[in-house]
Amino acid sequence: MTNTGNGAKIVVENFSDALCCRSVIFLKRVCSTNIVAGNLAKRGRNSAVIAAEQYGGMGSHGRRWESDICGGLYMSLATCGVSRDISVQYSSIAAAVAVRRTVQRAAGIAATVKWPNDLLLNGRKLCGILSEAFWGKDGAEYLITGIGLNVNQRCGDFPPELRGTATSLLIECGEEFGIKALAYDIIKSVDEIFRELEERGAAGLIEEYSANCCTLGKRISVSDCGREIFRGMAEGLGADGSLIVRGADGNVEEFNFGEVTNSEIQ
């Protein structure tokens, strides 16, 4: 047992192979795994922080991530000494590809990716990802990548307002999955992808992400803080993971932020 810096007691395991070495930290209940991972990163520790429940989890655009129910995988990865080749955008894309690979290996089902940071099954949200960078004078001091994967929740476990839009591996496959095994597989996959980014660049990652991205080829609306800022056809991804959108007038814009909705079904 040790202390995270915010009072939460933790149990630590070490996970390492040829590609990665992280402290893997399990908590029963905590405010936010991102906060705990950030406290550890400030001490120079690469870690994966996993909680059975978190009561202050945050999703994209400042929304609350519903994670105060048991049955999900709530994990934050802290990566210190980040290469300049690994941006916040690449971190989110790497995590999405890693989770998708894990789900396919474990459950035999192919999730799709909604740009920039959601995984969907049958049109419903299975996983959300939130990456943050903390900068020093020479670049990013560390990255925090938060992953919320719905694993063993039943429909009634979700709040009423989410039951029509959220899903889990249990709902889709009819069987429960080992959360710890999924976590370790995701950790290994993320670190494999980070190594690939450093050694070979982002082209392979962008290609795999694009091939499984349900946003591409759709007419979409891009919003920021609830305000629509552009509408058009999502044509592809830039080399940095930005979304390329062509407007009705032929004007092309690239976005590395924003919330996307399918304008064809609005």
Image (tube, grey):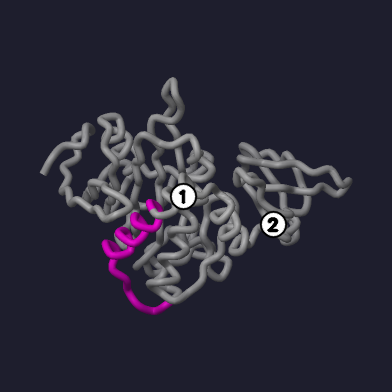
- Residue extending furthest toward the right: 249
x%, y% of residue 117?
A: 53, 51
Residue 179 within the segment the image draws in magenta: yes
Say if 109 sits above or below 258 in the image: below
Is the N terminus in the top left, top right, bottom left or bottom right quadrant?
top left
51 vs 125, left or right, is left
Instruction: Report which residue position mark 2 lands on.
Output: 262
Residue closer to the observer: 92 or 70 = 92
Q: Magenta residues: mostly which secondary structure?
A: helix
In this rendering, would 17 be left or right of 72? Answer: left
Q: Amino acid at mark 1?
A: Ile
Instruction: Tell me the residue at 66%/50% (across/down).
Output: 237
Extreme-top residue of the structure: 137
Label 2 environment density (alpha carbons within 10 Å; few <14, some 14–19, many ≥20): some
| Residue type of the residue flagged with mark 2 | Asn
Q: Is residue 74 left or right of residue 108?
A: left
- Residue drawn at 41 percent across, 70 percent down: 169
Q: Position of residue 47 (x, y in %)?
A: 28, 44
Q: Residue at x 28, y 68 (%)?
A: 178
Report crowding for label 1: few under 14, some 14 to 19, many 20 or more residues within 10 A (C-alpha): many
Residue on which disc 1 sits: 129
Which segment did they paint magenta?
A: 173-191
Q: Does dot 1 land on a helix, a strand or a loop? A: strand
Disc 2 element: strand
